[in-house]
Image (cartoon, helix red, strand yellow):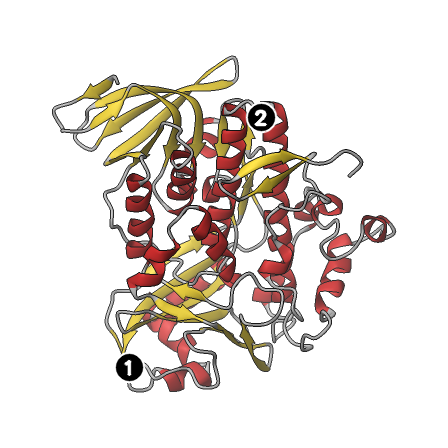
Amino acid sequence: MAYAIHQSGVHVRETTQVLVIGGGPAGSTAAALLARQGYQVTLLEKDRFPRYHVGESLLPSLLPLLDAMGARHLVEEHGFVRKSGAFYGWGGQEWSLGFDEPGRPAAYSFQVIRSQFDDLLLRHAQSQGVDVREGVTVRRIALDKGRAITATWATADGHHGETSFQYVIDASGRSGVIGARHLRGRRFHDVFRNVAAWGYWRGAAPLPCAPDGAIGVFSLPERGWLWAIPLHDGTLSVGLVTDKHSFNQERRHAGSVEALYRQALAQCPRLAQVLREARLTSHMKVESDYSYVCEAFCGPGYFLAGDAACFLDPLLSTGVHLAMYSATLSAASTAGVLSGHVQEADARRFYDTAYRHAYERLLVLVSAFYRIHDGRDSYFRKAQSLSHQDRQKLRLHESFLNIITGLDDLHDTQHDVVGHLHKRLAQPLPGHPDRGLGGHGTSHMVPLPTRPDQPTAGLYLRLDPHPRLQHAPRGT
């Protein structure tokens, strides 16, 4: 096997079947799933793990994906807080959501320290045969007649090289090596242009009336919402999300980010009670949560996974879900083409359709949740409303087929399709309370496309023994 060897000590293959850019949950999942099937996979990660990352609250929908990549036991045994539900104080109501309700993919999930969780997945991918190289940044992807063929990379100390591949999975996160930097095809939504500010507390009391290990989500009267996530190191992650305009304005008035943050906490009696004897033990962290989507999620020789393809507001804790969901789809699509069972054009059509539908469903779900916000005339609530331009570019007739309402139902709605969907989302599913989204949760909205009677672009996904694409039976 040919390697480019440099004084930095980094040995990188000069050629590989599949190149994965990024070692976060999307990259590690895709790489592990492909390596377990015997494909030669090289993963290049610009940082050295473990490294800090926000996004600590996971959804139950991840457990079947951890099973598929053979990593569930690692997460189970690590000691992360087991998350059995969520607690909401939203729009003047309070309610608990238990993951043990019928129809959910699992009765629990996890609250994780992402540096540890991500490192577990990356080391697992390595144990499955992935050639993992850290401290290597992919600078450029070369195209030949529109097809991705080689990656130019560099190490931290300035050494560089080139690796050719048959397929590349771009899981480079928000830096977006292919979609944002090379193709410049990223489009920002007018909605969810928010800022998050957060820190870590010690000595917090348990959240009363909440399921064990639950995340707490609390709306503020005018300017946003708060999260509270218990972690297994004894800290509580507490964050504020508000729109950029309000954040900048109120930071000037308060004098600092921490002062603004503490003022917001004081407006939430339930959370203020939890933190009464606690102390903030970290520096404040700030990040902008802009929502965006790439014009294409894949192309000749490449797939964009996770945040490299799209990014969504953190309200419903969907970040890691979308990362691993898309990683599973991209691994199945890549393996389908490499094995000769699926034509590349069909695999690309499946991937783009399945991932885009998942993203659009969650986009509408989050916007519907924000509509429940107390203080309906507040600037914050208006800032979370999908604009006319956002609505025009969504493919909602396709995205919601057989999910919330039938295709004919949507076609009958000539105006304001999003408003129609919001109304339907506010109606509870049978057996669910009339609170929040009435049971229309993420697991209901984003099922894996595994049903042969409901194919996506003529294909469906099978997970056993490895994720792979199957042609739907004729007549479906």
Q: Please state which of residues 43 and 269 is positioned toward the viewer in this rendering.
A: 43
- In which quarter of the view is residue 153 placed? top left
Between the C-alphas of marks 1 and 2, the distance is 57 Å
Circle 1 sits on which residue? 278
Position in image of residue 430 (x %, y %): 73, 72
Q: Residue furthest front?
A: 465
User: Residue 170, located in which quarter of the rendered image?
Assistant: top left
Q: Is 272 displayed left or right of 364 in the figure? A: left
Q: Quadrant location of the C terminus? A: top right
Q: Amino acid at mark 1?
A: Ala
* Residue type at numbered disc 2: His
Q: Is residue 184 visible?
A: no
Q: Answer whether labels 1 and 2 touch (C-beta < 8 Å).
A: no
Q: Which residue is mark 2?
A: 341
Residue sitting nearer the eye, 403 or 356: 403
| Secondary structure at numbered mark 1 | loop
Q: Indicate the position of residue 420 as horizontal and vertical percent values.
A: 78, 59
Please determine whether, in this image, residue 371 is positioned above or below residue 435.
Answer: above
Residue at 80% in and 36% down: 475
Q: Residue at x 36, y 27 (%)?
A: 40
Viewer-nearest of labels 1 and 2? 2
Location of residue 86 in the rendering, given as x and y in whole percent from the top left corner: 50, 73
Q: Is residue 419 left or right of residue 350?
A: right
Q: Residue furthest left?
A: 7
Q: Quadrant of the N terminus?
A: top left
- 175 and 10: which is toward the camera: 10
Other residues around mark 2 within 10 Å, as few (<14) / some (14–19) / many (≥20): some
How many numbered callouts?
2
Residue 191: x %, y % from top left: 58, 53
- Which label belongs to residue 264? none
* Relative depth, front residue between 129 and 116: 129
- Looking at marks 1 and 2 on the same chain, the residue that comes earlier in the sequence is marked by 1
